Image: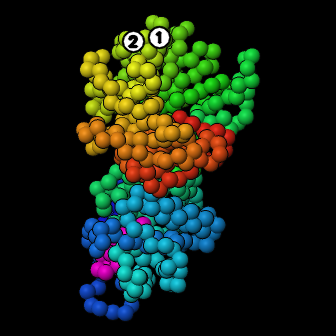
């Protein structure tokens, strides 16, 4: 049965970064059941919801251009954008085998769900076909999408969405995530966001002796689209991290000269100061429940790790060593924290219990830094390691302590950040000449460049 959903207005800037909630409408409009009598005429798919399977594992599906139900430019433009974005979203997760579009360019395009040329599509030996219809009327966009089993002509997935036409990409990001959840029991990342640091604006820090470039916090869709500037402090703002609920970003700011940790509450439009010390506090990391943050501070002399409540209260010192301790990352359970320390000579990755006990060294590289703990069900830590003359990314399995390498000297690669489903990483690389943000699959494949303007660093993926 086709589910009907409605988007809220995206009028405010803060709404752009929202993982927009979709609420179900009470109106339900099931499609017409298919005829059981064989006929050469195209048929409407049945109302049965099924799971699509493929003979070789991943179902092979086609995503032809969406059908515009009107000829105005708003409808035509939305249809063009949405079918391509959905194709890209599905390709990114690699759960479906997407058929290249040029292989079916000769098949007559459907004008509705009633005239799909199933016989022609079966000639391609595919498992599924995604058909979408789009219309913009009176500033309301209506999208209906169905995944059809090409062999049985049954509907395997169906949704209808209505709302503002301001961001048509958001509709199909939602389709992708819901399709992955229903068909593959997978949490997709199409509606997630990336945050990162950029110097693209070319501003210079005011009131300093050194001619230092301004670095500001940005955020974007997971695929790099809709890049927006968050901070306007004309100072150094670095190391942003999303809160677990995706509504706030904590970061290090030099706006008062000495680095301290700020929290930008995106929806409320408010700014909090986690630390207000004359000493340096940097590198915040949220606990999995969002109630605490771990950070590095030299308030007692050497840079050590501290844990504080979200409002900055109840500061507890976690480490106590003359070496430099930094770059904390919490385990998914919140019971442990991995971090970087040079207490053994060169920087290495250590793990400590959240109460400061149970310290253990887990890497033996010539150099290791910037650990990031994967979300469940995985139990891995990705980190930056020096491999020869370059920095590369490696992953250590915390159960077996087996280490695998993901990058191999394509420039310097550092600062990995896991996607919330643990299947992808965002990272910084100089492989394009300047520092840019890239994403890749957890096996090191499917590398995609996300940023291209200025120098960009310190990525983090929303939960």
Q: Residue furthest front?
A: 388
Q: How many marks?
A: 2
Measured as percent of width and height from the top left, residue 245 is found at: 39, 35
Q: Mark 1 highlights which residue?
A: 302
- Would you place residue 303 above or below residue 411 in this image? above
Measured as percent of width and height from the top left, residue 204 is found at: 73, 27
- Say what secondary structure mark 1 lies in: loop
- Would you place residue 177 above or below residue 69 in this image? above
Is 282 on the left-hand or right-hand side of 463?
right
Is 429 on the left-hand or right-hand side of 199?
left
Measured as percent of width and height from the top left, residue 62 is found at: 43, 73
Kindly indicate whether the residue at mark 1 contacts the one at mark 2 (C-beta within 8 angstroms): yes
Which one is nearer the viewer's eye here, 152 or 31? 152
In the picture, the quarter occupied by the N terminus is bottom left
- Say what secondary structure mark 2 lies in: loop
Q: CA distance from mark 2 to mark 1?
A: 8 Å
What crowding class fits label 1: few (fewer than 14 Cα within 10 Å), some (14-19), or many (20 or more)?
Answer: some
Which one is nearer the viewer's eye here, 193 or 437? 437
Q: Residue at x 43, y 61 (%)?
A: 90
The tag on residue 321 is 2
Q: Residue at x 54, y 57 (%)?
A: 168
The magenta segment: 145-155
Q: Toward which corner of the image does residue 412 lie, by quadrant?
A: top right
């Amino acid at each position: 049965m086709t589910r009907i959903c409605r988007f809220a207005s995206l009028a405010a800037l803060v709404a752009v970064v929202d993982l927009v909630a979709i609420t179900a409408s009470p109106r339900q409009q099931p499609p017409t059941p298919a005829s059981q009598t064989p006929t050469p005429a195209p048929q409407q798919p049945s109302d049965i919801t099924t799971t699509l399977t493929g003979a070789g594992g991943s179902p092979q599906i086609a995503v032809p251009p969406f059908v515009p139900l009107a000829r105005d430019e708003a409808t035509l433009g939305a249809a063009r954008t949405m079918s391509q974005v959905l194709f890209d979203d599905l390709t990114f997760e690699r759960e479906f085998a997407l058929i290249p579009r040029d292989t079916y360019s000769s098949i007559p395009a459907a004008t509705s769900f009633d005239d799909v040329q199933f016989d022609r599509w079966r000639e391609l030996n595919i498992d599924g076909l995604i058909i979408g219809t789009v219309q913009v009327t009176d500033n309301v966009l209506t999208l209906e999408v169905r995944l059809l089993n090409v062999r049985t002509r049954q509907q395997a997935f169906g949704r209808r969405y209505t709302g503002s036409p301001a961001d048509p990409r958001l509709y199909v990001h939602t389709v992708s995530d819901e399709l992955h959840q229903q068909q593959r029991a997978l949490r997709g990342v199409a509606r997630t966001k990336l945050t990162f640091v950029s110097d693209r604006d070319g501003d210079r820090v005011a009131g300093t002796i050194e001619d230092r470039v301004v670095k500001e916090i940005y955020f974007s869709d997971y695929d790099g689209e809709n890049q927006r500037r968050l901070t306007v402090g004309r100072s150094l703002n670095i190391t942003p991290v999303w809160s677990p609920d995706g509504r706030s970003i904590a970061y290090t700011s030099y706006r008062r000269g000495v680095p301290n940790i700020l929290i930008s509450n995106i929806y409320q439009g408010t700014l909090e100061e986690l630390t207000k010390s004359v000493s340096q506090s940097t590198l915040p990391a949220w606990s999995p429940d969002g109630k605490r943050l771990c950070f590095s501070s030299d308030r007692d002399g050497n840079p050590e790790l501290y844990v504080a409540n979200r409002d900055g209260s109840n500061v507890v010192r976690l480490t106590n060593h003359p070496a430099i301790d930094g770059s904390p990352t919490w385990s998914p359970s919140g019971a442990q924290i991995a971090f970087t320390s040079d207490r053994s000579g060169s920087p290495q990755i250590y793990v400590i219990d959240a109460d400061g006990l149970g310290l253990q060294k887990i890497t033996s590289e010539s150099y290791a830094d910037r650990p990031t703990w994967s979300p469940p069900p995985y139990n891995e830590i990705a980190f930056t390691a020096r491999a020869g003359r370059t920095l590369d990314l490696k992953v250590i399995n915390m159960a077996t302590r087996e280490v695998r390498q993901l990058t191999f000297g394509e420039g310097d690669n550092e600062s990995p950040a896991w996607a919330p489903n643990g299947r992808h990483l965002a990272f910084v690389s100089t492989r394009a000449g300047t520092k840019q943000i890239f994403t890749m699959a957890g096996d090191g494949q499917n590398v995609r460049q996300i940023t291209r303007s200025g120098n960009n660093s310190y990525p983090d993926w929303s939960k």
